[in-house]
Amino acid sequence: HLSLRLSLYTHSFDEEEEEAKMFRNQYDTDVTTWSPTGRLFQVEYAMEAVKQGSAAIGLRSRSHVVLASVNKAQSELSSHQRKIFKVDDHIGVAIAGLTADGRVLSRYMRSESINHSFTYESPLPVGRLVVRLADKAQQVCTQRSWKRPYGVGLLVGGLDESGAHLYYNCPSGNYFEYQAFAIGSRSQAAKTYLERRFESFNESSREDLIKDAILAIRETLQGETLKSSLCTVSVLGVDEPFHFLDQDSIQKVIDTFEKVPEEEEDGGEAEAEAAAAPAEQGGAGDQDVAPMEM
Amino acid sequence: LPVWFSINADYFFLQFTIPIDNGDSVKTAEADSQRTLYPYVTGTSIVAIKYKDGVLMASDMGGSYGSTLRYKNIERMKAIGKHSLLGASGEISDFQEILRYLDELVLNDNMWDDGNSLGPKEVHNYLTRVMYNRRNKFNPLWNTLVLGGVKNGESYLGMVSMIGVSFEDNHVATGFGNHLARPILRDEWHADLSFEDGVKLLEKCMRVLLYRDRSAINKLQIAKITEEGVTVSQPYSLKTFWEFKAFNNPTAGAEGSW
């Protein structure tokens, strides 16, 4: 219990205001217990787990969806965790939070997608997949006291008859549709960047969309030099099945805006309070960018 | 769960063998009455072609009870959802069962209310799964189905048989139509037929079937499906000619024969 309280206080502070009030209380032991104010605390704690994971970003235009993530490795010796999964040729998912939970849900999505394809010889509409996913999270979440919510947020991007879509599924079982979104640690920086530019995304070309995704990823790095080895980028669109961009392509895009090689700042120890300031500067756009002050 | 996953609970307790007549009268009688062994009330051929604006399908309105032409007002073509038209030959009650499955499918699809809708390709594939699955359980739906439709400007025409054989083509025919109508279609069908030419072609096929198929009756309907939707014509008859000289006095050369 003590460790739980500690973790609630030491997470990064670049979140919404409400969570500052999260104390341990007597209504949070069970997922099936309501608080007197009508909250399910275990569900809310599960949403916190999403913020622990490294950042994942999604954006869409009318015809394409780009999913990108930061490659976090446990140590220099290990490889980084996979956070983006192909669900079908026309659907991809990026996760943040408990990656183990994310893997299981990705497998569920793949299974639903392939069953639909087999019966109807036709791709499963993303909107329907997302609802089934949300129901599964809901069922597990609140209906049974011997289960716990999934501790992972999913950015589901896909294409169907009605166009390109990006959805965010959270552990509470809610899902929302977005033009662009970011989840995970330091995602607020990316969200600020995206908020400034999202109105143009619908008409963006595929290349601009990819560039914006990588720039948004850079926001979450808070001073670390952006290298292609630090991020994973995936694209899907009309006439373009889901696939990952290889390191060279990513590096090429990075080179178009990181013309000035940055001096090595002090690692990635981000003082999260200052998240807002670098975000303003980084968001200055696609032109030659001044090195971030950190 | 998809419909074709539903298993008749009785099957778990009964022997699942094909009855062989070896003189044994105790033949797991219950098992037999649970599955289709032969058809009872059947419809005859369906003929369908793709044309310029979509698909045209023709069928007569007869339901035969063995060799008796018992029912003369059976509609064997029905609209499915917004984009498809289903025609069936074979056992009429199985056709009605299929219509109920599809009703449920279309209802659930509509309930999503999300801008996506089942097109002819999806319905055709679903039916293929259902028919093949039933065949695997030795309990077929005794029909040959013709599925036509138009979605997003693309015409679609396919067929599924009672054993689950399924394919698409520009023109299809079931039952006797396979033998009598198909050769005509192969010779005379071409892409972008106008509506009038398409109807003429179908009527030519139906007339041949009327002359030669004993379970055909002279009361047919033609259905049209285009991007706008489905229309099924009122029943009408074809003009026939029976005054061929050879038929006039057929027993002239051999009195007493017929």
Image: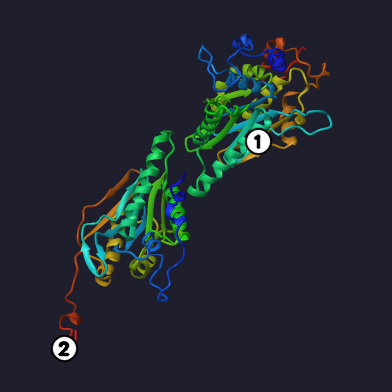
Circle 1 sits in a helix, a strand or a loop, which is it?
helix
Q: How far apart are marks 2 and 1 (CA)?
A: 84 Å
Q: Is B224 left, or right, of A211 in this rendering?
A: left
Q: Is B12 left, or right, of A100 in this rendering?
A: left
Residue situated in front as seen by the camera: B11 or B80: B11
Name the image colouring. rainbow
Circle 2 sits in a helix, a strand or a loop, which is it?
loop
Q: Is A219 left, or right, of B106 in this rendering?
A: right
Q: Residue B256 carries which label?
A: 2
Q: Position of residue B151 (x, y in %)?
A: 41, 45
Q: Residues within 10 Å of mark 2 (few under 14, many from 20)?
A: few
- Whether residue A50 is situated above or below residue A164 in the rendered picture: above
Report which quarter residue B168 is drawn in. bottom left
Q: Residue at x 40, y 39 (%)?
A: B108
Q: Residue A112 carries which label?
A: none
Q: Where is residue A145 in the image (x, y as percent from the top left)?
A: 56, 27
Report which quarter residue A95 is drawn in. top right
- Whether residue A263 is situated above or below residue A244 in the rendered picture: above
Query: Number of numbered discs present?
Result: 2
Residue wearing tag 1: A103
Residue A197 in sight in this render: no
| Chain under disc 1 | A
Q: Which residue is drawn at 52% across and 46% down?
A: A117
- Whether residue B158 is situated above or below residue A217 in the rendered picture: below
At label 2, the amino acid type is Gly
